[in-house]
Image: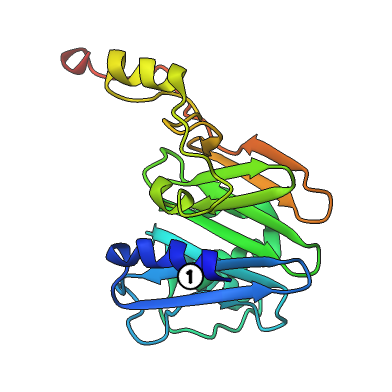
């Protein structure tokens, strides 16, 4: 428990307005959130759970089409606990459609949803990877964060430089791909989601979006 509190403390600069923590003692799972209140100032505290307690979300970002999606969900009979929270919109969409809900989202985001029945964790990152998401998996242990440095608060994460990543950084001034400067810590790729099974410790990652380009042959000559 002290580990998750320390990870959250390190990220206090990211969200000075609110913090929250969720624990499932049965699965030895915890996740915490620091929030900067922008849209739903009063009732947007996180984590947020569905009314049946099955799904719980922590969310970083903004869903631009949340108002339209909220109307769509209300027509389907969904009853919201908050007034304007785009976080709850993402949660309720996932409860209905699973990973297919990502296709409906327009925005910049990285979020985690825990399935308390299936004992699985769903992590995703927006189309272009605007919002960051890092994770660590080793020997049946899994951890994730929106900042690399909070993962370094964990005693089982070694502060060992990935030499290939260092080479890339010195050559390109950034680290491409999914590796990071710290060995063992990975970055979820843009337009991808992953599912981690807390019972089997299996992890699978899948690309949910990729850019498509097509020729527009109807442009006037002056625009060519």
Looking at the rendered structure, the secondary structure element under dot 1 is helix
Q: Is residue 25 above or below residue 187?
A: below
Q: Quadrant of the C terminus?
A: top left
Q: Is residue 132 left or right of residue 96?
A: left
Q: Is residue 179 visible?
A: yes
Which residue occupies the foreground of this view, 71 or 57? 57
Q: Indicate how the structure is coloured in the image.
A: rainbow
The residue at the point 49 percent across, 29 percent down is 179
- The residue carrying mark 1 is 5
Q: Is residue 89 visible?
A: no
Q: Which residue appears farthest toward the right when viewing the image?
A: 200
Numbered-mark total: 1
Q: Quadrant of the N terminus?
A: bottom right
Q: Residues within 10 Å of mark 1 (few under 14, many from 20)?
A: some
Task: Please provide percent x and percent y for residue 89.
Answer: 52, 69
Among the 4 quarters of the image, the one containing residue 16? bottom left
Task: Please provide percent x and percent y for residue 185.
Answer: 52, 38
The residue at the point 73 percent across, 43 percent down is 139
Q: Is residue 158 above or below residue 124?
A: above
The residue at the point 37 percent across, 15 percent down is 167
Task: Please provide percent x and percent y for residue 213.
Answer: 44, 22
Task: Please provide percent x and percent y for residue 135.
Answer: 55, 45
Which residue occupies the foreground of this view, 103 or 222? 103
Which residue occupies the foreground of this view, 97 or 183? 183
Q: Is residue 107 left or right of residue 2?
A: left
The residue at the point 64 percent across, 74 percent down is 23
Which residue occupies the foreground of this view, 206 or 27? 27
């Amino acid at each position: 428990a002290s580990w998750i509190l320390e990870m959250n403390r390190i990220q206090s600069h990211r969200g000075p307005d609110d913090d929250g923590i969720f624990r499932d003692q049965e699965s030895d799972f915890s996740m915490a959130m620091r929030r900067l209140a922008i849209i739903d100032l009063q009732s947007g505290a996180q984590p947020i759970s569905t009314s049946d307690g099955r799904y719980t979300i922590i969310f970083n970002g903004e869903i631009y089409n949340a108002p339209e999606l909220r109307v769509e969900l209300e027509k389907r009979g969904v009853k919201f606990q908050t007034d304007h929270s785009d976080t709850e919109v993402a949660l309720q969409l996932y409860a209905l459609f699973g990973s297919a809900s990502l296709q409906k989202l327009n925005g910049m985001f990285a979020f985690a949803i825990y399935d308390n029945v299936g004992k699985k964790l769903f992590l995703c990152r927006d189309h272009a990877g605007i919002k960051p998401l890092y994770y660590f998996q080793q020997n049946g242990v899994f951890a994730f964060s929106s900042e690399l440095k909070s993962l370094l608060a964990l005693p089982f994460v070694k502060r060992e430089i990935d030499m290939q990543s260092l080479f890339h950084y010195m050559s390109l001034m950034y680290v491409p791909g999914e590796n990071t400067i710290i060995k063992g810590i990975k970055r979820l790729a843009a337009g991808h989601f992953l599912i981690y099974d807390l019972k089997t410790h299996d992890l699978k990652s899948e690309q949910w979006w990729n850019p498509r380009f097509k020729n527009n042959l109807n442009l006037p000559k002056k625009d060519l």
